[in-house]
Image (tube, rainbow, N blue to C red):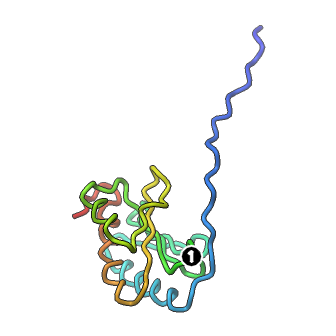
Amino acid sequence: MKPLKPKANRKQPARPRPKLLPISEEMRQWSALLEAELLSWPGVTAKPMFGLRAIYKGKTIFAALPRTRGIGPTASFILKFNPMLPALLKRAKADPRLDTSTRVPGTGWFSFALNSEDDLRDALWWLNRSYESAKGGNPR
């Protein structure tokens, strides 16, 4: 009988988790406005997730809005593209509010910083692109 070989450790090294910081009252209001709009879209649901609200199209997560805690020190939320089309990536890199530099390669998550109430319109535009890219939709 052959001796058993130990199985190779197949676990990937753990990525550092982002720090979840308390959010401002202003960000709480902006998140509530964005969530109310998103929940009016077809097939969208929201679930609690570590102080955030995970936003789903069907069973596919496409965004997370802060409820009590946010990712990083700025007033921001995260959205997912799987994948982000090249033309949209070019536009994302030109938008200083959309952080493409700190995303984890291969995950498709980006953060969008809200600086004022005026940014909500553009935030919805990006959220709509993310919504359309979830489960096979083609973003415009």
Task: Give the quadrant of the N terminus.
Answer: top right
Q: Position of residue 39 (x, y in %)?
A: 39, 78
**73 displayed left or right of 31:** right
Residue at the image position 52 percent from the left and 74 percent from the top = 53
Q: Position of residue 115 (x, y in %)?
A: 43, 84
**85 displayed left or right of 52:** left
Of residues 46 and 10, the one nearer the viewer is: 10
Q: Position of residue 114 (x, y in %)?
A: 43, 81
Q: Tag 1's secondary structure?
A: strand
The quadrant where residue 137 appears: bottom left
Q: Position of residue 96 (x, y in %)?
A: 37, 72
Q: Is residue 10 above or below residue 46?
A: above
- The residue most toward the left is 140
Of residues 113 and 14, the one nearer the viewer is: 113
Residue at the image position 47 percent from the left and 59 percent from the top = 103
Residue at the image position 50 percent from the left and 81 percent from the top = 75
The number of discs equals 1
Q: Is residue 125 above or below residue 5?
A: below
Task: Give the quadrant of the C terminus.
Answer: bottom left
**84 displayed left or right of 104:** left
**Pointer 1 residue:** 70
Mark 1 crowdedness (10 Å alpha carbons): few <14, some 14-19, many ≥20: many
Of residues 42 and 101, the one nearer the viewer is: 101
Q: Is residue 67 above or below residue 6?
A: below
Of residues 133 and 110, the one nearer the viewer is: 110
> Which amino acid is tagged 1?
Gly
